[in-house]
Image (tube, rainbow, N blue to C red):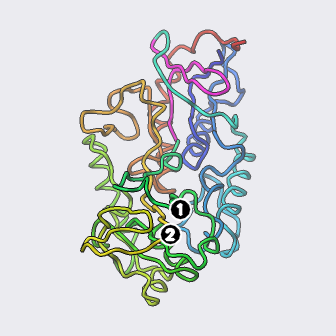
Amino acid sequence: MRTAKLVVVGGGQSGLSAGYHLRRRGFGSALQDSSGGSTFVVLDASDGAGGAWRERWESLRMATVNGIFDLPGFPKPPIDPGEPSRTAVPRYFASFEEQAELPIERPVRVTSVHDGPDGGLIVETDRGPWATRAVINATGTWDNPVRPEYPGSDTFTGRQLHAREYVAAPEFAGRRVAVVGGGITAVQLIEEISRVAKTFWYTRREPVFREAFEPEVAGRETITKVTADVEAGRPTGSVVSYTGLIWTPYAVAARDRGALDRRPMFTGIEPYGVREADGSFTTVDTILWATGFKASLAHLDPLHLRNEQGGIRLIGTRVAADPRVHLVGFGPSQSTVGANRAGREAVNALYSFLTTAPSPESPSRCT
């Protein structure tokens, strides 16, 4: 059993921010505490720096991402707007990790977190367990895509995929593609795919576009709404449910080509297409589910953090039901600027707890 006073689960932006602020507080400076265990460790499931950015679709360029806020104390270098985000962001993260000298172990996948002896926690991984006093969870959403169950989906003879599996538009050339989803990703993918294929856009609700997103006003309003939800223990919605869609250049381009003629959600899937809300039939050979993601928190289920509404109530970043667990990159901290702030907030909240609580026992490795 390996030990650490604190385990950070996830090495994306919020996990790196937490690691940075732990270092600033003096944790990990010697990488050992008095019992022989690490003072903190970051466990990351990826085999390299970059978090979910490593897996973004090939055509997503830095010019079209929704903004990457600088990691703490480490401004981004000049980046070519035409460079794929899947290479630019991981390179930036890797440079940050090297400068900050963070104790990151990868690839390590956390499978569960449960109660341990003396009020501590056991973090189970595919490379053996860790005993710890507290966990900062920074696992994001990428590993938990939402793919709705729909009548007849198992009879469809064409291809179905989630946006997580999307690579680039050319693979859809000449096809008839139903794109399902009312968020930013759906609009981005429609803009690309509609250049080489016939697309049909389906959403449950009529999309609401705004001319621009003003961070000073709309950003604060959004954070206020999401914070109210998590503090009340309500499940949070998608980003676009709080912000609406923006008439970005790529959205305008798609609209001007007639690709954003939205249809109400189809009522069923048949072998060769979909049954429309008005009863008519549309032939499609591909269904692309751009239906978003939910927080990847299944490994925390043994701690029973969810309430009867299915949400997790937070006080700041701390789980109200369990002061040993903090969630960053969750709820109001799901943006890159929010992830930075949440990392700092979680470390500040845990500082006195970590410096006064006894170190986990059993410092020796399992064999």
Residue 137 within the segment the image draws in magenta: yes
Amino acid carrying mark 2 in the image: Asp
Per the picture, the main secondary structure of the magenta-coloured stretch is: strand
Sequence-earlier tag: 1 or 2: 1
Look at 43% across and 53% down and name the residue there. 154
Residue 9 within the segment the image draws in magenta: no
Residue beneath disc 2: 285
Q: Nearer the viewer, residue 216 or 248?
A: 248
Q: Is 165 on the left or on the right of 212, as rendered?
A: right
Q: From the top left corner, tell me how far across and down residue 307 is, in percent.
A: 28, 33
User: Label 1's element?
Assistant: strand
Look at 45% across and 14% down and name the residue there. 119
Which of the numbered marks, if any, corresponds to residue 159?
A: 1
Q: How many marks?
A: 2
Q: Nearer the viewer, residue 284 or 85?
A: 284
- The answer to whether residue 159 is above or below residue 175 is above
Q: From the top left corner, tell me how far across and down residue 36 is, in percent.
A: 69, 15
- The answer to whether residue 250 is above or below residue 154 is below
Task: Specify start and end residues of the magenta stretch as a single range.
Answer: 119-138
Q: From the top left corner, tell me how far across and down residue 73 is, in percent.
A: 63, 53
Q: Is 20 on the left or on the right of 246, as rendered?
A: right
Q: Is 88 on the left or on the right of 315, as rendered?
A: right
Look at 64% across and 74% down and name the residue there. 170
User: Label 2's element?
Assistant: loop
Amino acid carrying mark 1 in the image: Arg
Assess whether mark 2 and mark 1 are in contact (beta carbons under 8 angstroms): yes
- The answer to whether residue 246 is above or below residue 311 is below
